[in-house]
Image (cartoon, grey):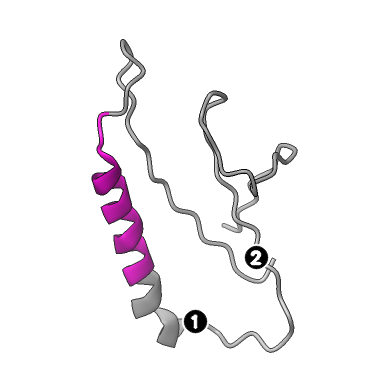
Amino acid sequence: VLERWEFDIAAGEDAETGQSQKTSKAVTGEIQALVRQITASVTFLPMIEEPCTFDILVYTSQDTETPAQWEVSDARENITNQ
């Protein structure tokens, strides 16, 4: 692992109804804010010279509709250097 970033975007489901408390527009706004933060920090990131791949892990509820291109993976261990 050369670089690891973790972002937490929660739709905020209501415990009784299971319905999202946030609109799609609000969640999209949070994602856009994260992308802006990443873009603003590019000058501080190290240059990676070798070819790399990027894994994006998305944790969802079992009943969440996901795009057909997504694949289910095995459980992943979160390792942090402290």
The residue closer to the viewer here, 44 or 19, is: 19
Query: Badge 1: few (under 14), some or many (20 or more) residues near its Cα, within 10 Å?
Result: few
Where residue 19 sits: x, y (%)? Answer: 32, 22
Q: Where on the picture, by quarter, is residue 4?
A: bottom right
Disc 1 residue type (three-letter): Leu
Q: Residue at x 65, y 50 (%)?
A: 79
Residue 54 tag number: 2
Vertical arrangement, residue 38 with respect to residue 60, above or below: below
Mark 2–mark 1 Cα distance, whole angstroms, equals 15 Å
Residue 65 tag number: none
24 sits to left or right of 49: left
Magenta span: 21-36
Q: Where on the picture, by quarter, is residue 34?
A: bottom left
45 sits to left or right of 16: right
Where residue 13 sits: x, y (%)? Answer: 34, 25
Where residue 62 sits: x, y (%)? Answer: 57, 25
Q: Quadrant of the C terminus?
A: bottom right
- The answer to whether the residue labelled 2 contacts the one labelled 1, judged by CB atoms less than 8 Å apart, is no
- From the image, state whether disc 2 or disc 1 is nearer to you: 2
Q: Which residue is mark 1?
A: 45
The residue closer to the viewer here, 47 or 53, is: 53
Q: Quadrant of the N terminus?
A: bottom right
Q: Where on the picture, by quarter, is residue 75?
A: top right
Q: In the structure shown, which secondary structural element does the residue marked by tag 2 occupy?
A: loop
Q: In the structure shown, which secondary structural element does the residue marked by tag 1 occupy?
A: loop
User: Is residue 75 magenta-colored?
Assistant: no
Disc 2 residue type (three-letter): Phe
Where residue 59 sits: x, y (%)? Answer: 55, 39
